[in-house]
Image (cartoon, rainbow, N blue to C red):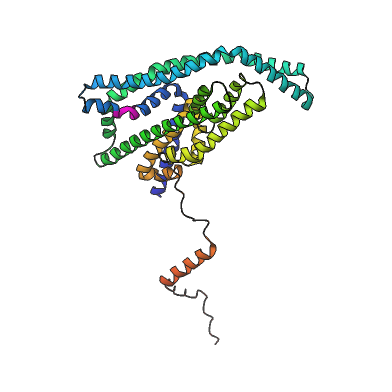
Amino acid sequence: MESTQVNYQKRIFTILLLVVVAAIIYLGSDILFPIVLAFIFGVLIRPIDSFFQRKWHFPKLLSVIITVAIAVIVFAGIMLLLGFQLKEFFSDLPTLEKNMTKVIHDIADWISKTFDISNVKQEKIVKENFMKGGSMFSMESFGSITGALVNFILVPLYLFLFLFYRELLLGFLMKLVSAKSAERMQIIVNDIKVIIRMYILGLLLEIAIVAALTTLGLWLIGVKYALFLGLLVALLNLIPYVGILVANALSCLISLSNNPDIQQSVLGVIAVIGAVQLIDNNILLPRIVGSKVRINALASIICVIVGGSLAGVPGMFLAIPVTAIIKVVFDAVPNLEPYGYLLGDEMPKAIFWTKKKEVTEKIVKEQIKNPRPNKPKAASRTKPKPKSE
């Protein structure tokens, strides 16, 4: 009775803990996003810091500053490359507006002929919806730009602090557990470190290949801004399942600035991005990224949706690496091991799909090897009949 009550208490505590964690993520997503991002990249670039300290004997402070500076310069270089492409794109906005006007008129005529909705009524619907969401859109855009600038400052700062106070944080983790569990904690920390590094490096390699293939394909079909669109598709591909849909829509929209013909521009872009996605999903992702993070597709989709609902686009971006870290912890803790098994992609051997005949033969063989002892017959409980006198 007491063991059952203890099990119920553990389950209630686990549920309450999950609710509290979800509430913290939902309410503090703006605070947690730069911290988690800095932690992941801190683990990734830690070997650079270690190299400067061990090989060149740099002081710790100088080594950390140089390491963070290298990371910021690389990131700034990528943003600068995108900025040049965006500058060229914005210079062609009048052409894009002209071509988009033609496309919108063609779509409006098709809707009018197919659904019998006049152009005047369509314009009225669009204006009503635009007026309702116009101010909100501007405020959201301003908030997004401000948040991006704040994160651009906070992430390098957190990155520097994580690298500088690395030993302090590791010592704190060791003090959380008893001396008997210290070795297990070291294994967990090392597994998390390996998974993050291998996952991020695999992800960067995947981004480079996807960007190169997409740029080449768009350039061959004559799409303008092929390099910009290739980088955009590769970066949006970081958001699982959702990012590629957004990338397709933006790529088709931008391609209209060069060619207003929907059949030549939109269909060609969709064909190129679709072909690259087939290569990515069937060759690159399983061999480069999937081999590093063993999470099944069902768990990935659910984690991405939950991450998006709790923290928006940043939550979707961090859903897979955070889930991989959680899986490492689950696999190392005996009580949580079933949950780690549920997140993994190791398919068990047939349990419920085994043929009925094989199951029956197995049961018969076990009964022959280990026959059950015959139970003594129960004594008759019927009252003896009275002897007739």
Q: Is residue 309 visible?
A: no
Decide whether residue 44 is among the magenta residues. yes
Q: Is residue 92 visible?
A: yes
13 displayed left or right of 139: left
Q: Residue furthest bottom?
A: 389
Q: Position of residue 329 (x, y in %)?
A: 37, 39
Task: Out of 111 and 162, give the one closest to the viewer.
Answer: 111
Decide whether residue 207 is among the magenta residues. no
Q: Position of residue 63 (x, y in %)?
A: 26, 22
Q: Residue furthest left?
A: 57
**Which residue is painted at 29% across and 19% down in the image?**
65
- Residue 293 position by quadrant: top left
- Residue 24 position by quadrant: top left
The relative height of residue 36 versus residue 370 in the rendered view (above or below) is above
Task: Out of 108 and 142, give the one closest to the viewer.
Answer: 108
Q: Position of residue 323 (x, y in %)?
A: 43, 35
Q: Main secondary structure of the magenta part?
A: helix
Task: Out of 281 and 134, give the one closest to the viewer.
Answer: 281
Number of numbered discs overlaid on the protein picture: 0
- Residue 39 position by quadrant: top left
Looking at the rendered image, the quarter that the C terminus falls into is bottom right
**Residue extent of the magenta highlight:** 42-47
**Which residue is painted at 42% across and 72% down in the image?**
373
